[in-house]
Amino acid sequence: MLFFYLLEVYGDCLEIRTSEFDELIVNDKVIKSSELVGFDNVKISHPGTSIFKFIKTKKKTFKLVDITRYIDKKYERNIRIDYEVKYKDWLRGQEKLTCILTMLALSFLFFFKNIFGVFKV
């Protein structure tokens, strides 16, 4: 359980579709949705110890702002920007992996049913 908590603290991300913005400002870098041909999602990864939020500056223009409350001074955080292609909120190839894992799980159930007599009706 602690592992999953630390995994969430180590990294966090914000996602926005390219249809939702015209311009996205991240650390003085302007990302225009018209230049992202072939991508339909922008994912911004940052450490889980900081809180970032999209602030709307103009119509369909957003700016990424660090809203973390610091005690003594503000720290610069590393931010990674990824451009993704998703189909119905699934990454490419994710449906194949899900089908393979489901088929493996079902085959193990049938294996245990035949060997150990589990699930007798």
Image: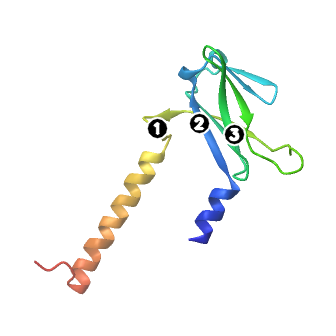
Q: Residue at x 37, y 53 (%)?
A: 99
Q: Is residue 120 above or below residue 73?
A: below
Residue 68 image point, x, y percent: 74, 44
Residue 7 image point, x, y percent: 64, 60
What number is the disc on residue 15? 2
State left or right for residue 32 relative to residue 106: right
Distance of mark 2 from mark 3, alpha carbons? 11 Å
Of the two numbered discs 3 and 1 on the same chain, state the one appearing first in sequence: 3
Task: Give the amino acid at mark 2.
Answer: Glu
State left or right for residue 6 relative to residue 38: right
Task: Give the amino acid at mark 3.
Answer: Phe
What number is the disc on residue 52? 3
Task: Give the amino acid at mark 1.
Answer: Asp
Pick the residue in front: 97 or 26: 26
Of the two numbered discs 1 and 2 on the same chain, state the one appearing first in sequence: 2
State left or right for residue 86 relative to residue 60: left
Of the two numbered discs 2 and 3 on the same chain, state the one appearing first in sequence: 2
Which quadrant would residue 40 be assigned to in this image?
top right
> Marks 1 and 3: in contact by CB < 8 Å?
no
Q: Is residue 41 above or below residue 30?
A: below
